[in-house]
Image: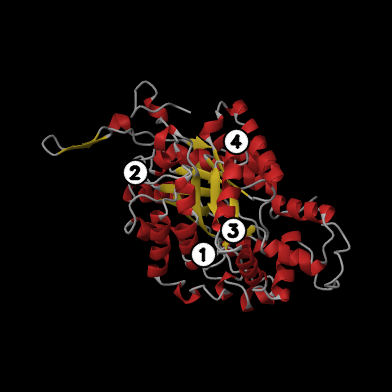
Amino acid sequence: MSNGKRQLALGAMMFFPAGEHISSWRHPGSEAEGLLDFNYYKRIAQTAERGRFDMFFYADELYVWDRFESGISHANSIRPEPFTLLSALAAVTSHIGLAATISTTYNDPYHIARKLATLDHFSGGRAAWNIVTSQTDEEARNFGKERHLQHELRYERAKEFVEATQGLWDSWEEDALLFDKESGYFADKNKLHNLDYEGTHFKVKGPLNITRPPQGYPVLIQAGASEAGKEVAAATAEIVFAPGGSFSEGKALYEDIKGRLAKYGRSPDEIKILPALMPIIGATVEEAAERLAIVENLTPDRLALDLLSHYIGVDVSGYPLHEPLPFLPEEEGFNQSKSGIQRIRRILKEEDLTLIQLAKRIVNKRAFAGTPEQIADHIEEWFNHGAADGFNIAFTHLPGALDDFVAEVVPILQHRGLLRLEYEGTTLRDHFGLSKPKNRYSQDKISLGTTQR
């Protein structure tokens, strides 16, 4: 890392292909017509690489949100398949990490271990996996089920899924391939291992039919802020996507997750916590406020209300728009995002908002408007005072808001010595300062100078 100083970690987040929130496609500066044009994604990834971001992160879901009519009529529902996209981006970038959301509920470990290992090989060690359990019944119905797995059960499944996947990545020891044409030996059979994994949810024999990824394991990311999510993060994750919010909320979550690591034999520097931030940049405070107003007015009231209904599991369409929601949503028995409903409950307890104000707040939950200096100050405060190891940067619209961030905020962060001027390594683990996990079958060998976690 530059000058031995702790460096800011940055992810460039594509939550929807047009930008962070559900109506990004409507922004005057968006290029939504490019959503199925590879050159659109290529430009975004290359811009993030030029800005020395650690990684490009592509969020994914396995359904069209058709619970409400507005989800079809007004919301963006187009998402290219992530492995196809990231593999193509690997060929047109050279340093930036390539991360995607992959569900442990609607996949199997062998498939995902194989796909991620291939991506890691073809990208030269730049793959990452955002481990999610999915959230909705809409997804379940695309995979032969009527209802989504219960919260605790899907996290139990996720734990086994990751264990099995990591085991498959260890199938081949580092020097197992011989390629000895003279003798006819392709591989050393003693350095290839069956996993023979058997849990409650998975039974996987192995071995994997591709050698160990260059990073050992692709970087593991986790985004749940529920109690179960925080435990999974502390046990297995290397990057945590945090929801953002106030500084005090960010600091509390940071300390909570870091404080759980010791019981898993891990040190605080083995996990990087990246809150989400959607910067809205203006040359002046007034211009930033005007740009924020544009974003706040993109989402039709009907869509905002339906989105709130989705998040709390109760249809709010019959309540008066300009009066407070007359009840506190119940967390007990809620089977979608636990951290999401907890946040809404907290807002309702702390602020006096009308129903439509609450709905609009939920749509634009990560926004921070200011001048480039103010945005850099905000990032620096969280980074230097125990609330973040970096940020997962979201964008009001793409590619324009990313262009602005790279042109106007990145140079300030670099000038302050917070962000690298050049990449100093080639893998995503290099960028984050994470060690390469040792192969479980090579305990008695020193492998590439790494240590077993």
In the rendered image, the vertical position of residue 221 relative to residue 190, given as above or below:
below
From the viewer's side, name the closer residue of 131 and 422. 422
Disc 4 vs disc 3: which is toward the camera? 3
Residue corresponding to mark 4 = 234
| Residue type pointed to by label 3 | Met
The residue shown at (66%, 44%) is: 250
Task: Give coordinates of residue 290: x percent, y percent.
Answer: 64, 70
**Which quadrant does the N terminus fall into?**
top left
Residue named by callout 1: 401
Give x and y (percent) for residue 261.
60, 30
C-alpha gap between disc 3 and disc 2: 28 Å
- Amino acid type at mark 4: Ala
| Badge 2 density bin: few <14, some 14–19, many ≥20, Cα 10 Å | some
* Disc 1 secondary structure class: helix
Disc nearer the start of the sequence (3/1): 3
Q: Nearer the viewer, mark 4 or mark 1?
A: 1
Q: Measure the alpha-carbon separation of dots 4 and 3.
A: 26 Å
Asked whether the viewer can see residue 226, the reply is no
Query: Which residue in the protein does label 2 denote?
Result: 426
The CA distance from mark 4 to mark 1 is 33 Å
- Residue closest to the far right: 326
Badge 1, how many Cα within 10 Å: few under 14, some, many 20+? many
**Mark 4 element type:** helix
- Of residues 132 and 385, the one nearer the viewer is 385
Q: CA distance from mark 3 to mark 1?
A: 9 Å
Of the pair 171 and 343, the residue shown nearer to us: 343
User: Is disc 3 surrounded by few (<14), some (14 to 19) or many (20+) residues within 10 Å?
Assistant: many
Determine the residue positioned at 40% across, 34% down. 3
